[in-house]
Image: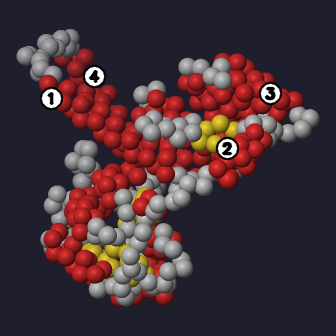
Amino acid sequence: VSNSMLAEDIAPTRLDRARQIMYLMVDRLTNHRIAIVVFAGKAYLQMPLTADHTAAKMYINAAGPELVSVQGTALKEALNRSSQSFNTQDKKYKAVILITDGEDHDEDAVEEAENMAKEGIVVNTIGIGSTKGSVIKNPESGEVKLDADGKPVVSVLNEKVLQEIAQAGNGTYHYYTQTATAVQAMEEAILQMEQREIVEESSKVYQSLYMYPLLAALFLWLIELFVSDKRKRLEMALKPALMLILVFAFGSSSAQHLREGNTLYNKGEFEKAAEQYKLAADKKNDFAAHFNYGNALYKSKQPDAALNAYQTAIAQSARPQDKAAAWYNSGVVLQQSGKVDECIEAYKEALKLAPDDAEARHNLQKALREKQQQEQQSQQQQKQQPKPSQQQPTPSPARLSKKEAEDKLRALQQQERNLQDKLKKQEPVPASTPEKDW
């Protein structure tokens, strides 16, 4: 999903054709489990192995450059993420289809494909793009992307590296010409592999034996009311969740306020809970107090104060998972407040710290779709606005005498000469090395 996949040498874009290939592959491979890894300069597991093909299509549709903050073409990392998504105990029945323009020559990717082949993973590749190359256009402005020297960026398909990866991974390389032929080539390659029947957990029928662990679970639940040091995320079907940290420590007044705050929070008395969390934060300036304080403030209809509390919580912890949780909750507050751009940045920060956070990724995709809808509505409103029938008259400049005009002209000429002399004395500044971001 790098910016180079927006090139239009394969109309409408390389990315659109890649999505089309994946859609048809999902329809054809009805009896197979599928995982999705998106990558540019970094790679992320977008969807773990599953037989839920409807979910797969949803993730395919949401794939785009905005999902990955670092641009480039990290082929090795993409292959490594794909390898990690498989069961390491299986030495066969595993295949990867890498769809890319291979814009960078990543020699480490070939070595990674060799290692995957040793684990029984077949690596197939599809090269999408032209060997002559194509410029990249900004999808919003339509302008051609320029490098640091002001020259148009030309993205060229790197067939060689994709052929080497497929050969090292005991797979097949296919150069894209038509979607149907690409899908057929990959389908034939997969059907030639040895296969086995997979039973999804959701299709198994279990005997109801809940009564045996029920008493133990009830006992543990009672303990958790008093002693807990773990973070919980409350999952909701349609709107983002918030997390609440429960902390207990003997003989600690801060912990006492935290416990009282948790009790009030669970009762829905959020303003009183916020007071207790504030007292806890005043006595012990730590992550848990500020984090819970932010949650209670948000529930008390104080989103700005909640955001400040989350930022304080981020500063109080060195643990990535804590920081990711606070960024996630900041994203929730911003999203509910209608601040789409800010919430997108918050979710991105959370994903940088916790790349496998499926909830943060889901909320980010939802926010990106919302932003796209807002931009489309704004464009439609601009088109519907009537153009002014006539321009406003401009006041005519005051007339100058002949002598005043000559004096003004001489002054302007002298300023120009002074500027030219100053520029000649300055040393030329060497151009910086262009930074690749496509």
Residue under the point 22% across and 20% down: 405
Q: Amino acid at mark 4?
A: Asp
Q: Residues within 10 Å of mark 1 (few under 14, many from 20)?
A: few
Q: CA distance from mark 3 to mark 1?
A: 56 Å
Marking on residue 59: none
Residue under the point 16% across and 75% down: 181
Q: CA distance from mark 1 to mark 4?
A: 48 Å
Quarter of the image where the C terminus is located: bottom left
Residue lying at the far left in this picture: please name it. 389
Estimate the x, y position of residue 3 in percent, counting from the top left. 33, 58
Quarter of the image where the N terminus is located: bottom left
Residue 85 lies left or right of residue 142; in this view the side is right
Marking on residue 231: 2
Q: Which residue is mark 1?
A: 383
Q: CA distance from mark 3 to mark 4?
A: 78 Å
Q: Which residue is mark 4?
A: 407
Q: CA distance from mark 4 to mark 2?
A: 76 Å
Q: Secondary structure at mark 1?
A: helix
Estimate the x, y position of residue 52 in percent, counting from the top left. 36, 58
Estimate the x, y position of residue 398 in percent, counting from the top left. 20, 11
Q: Nearer the viewer, residue 58 or 129?
A: 58
Residue under the point 12% across and 20% down: 386
- Counting residues from the N terminus, which is met first, the one under dot 3 or under dot 4? 3
Q: Residues within 10 Å of mark 2 (few under 14, many from 20)?
A: some
Q: CA distance from mark 1 to mark 2?
A: 49 Å
Do the residues under discs 3 and 4 have CB atoms within 8 angstroms?
A: no
- Counting residues from the N terminus, which is met first, the one under dot 2 or under dot 3? 2
Q: Amino acid at mark 3?
A: His
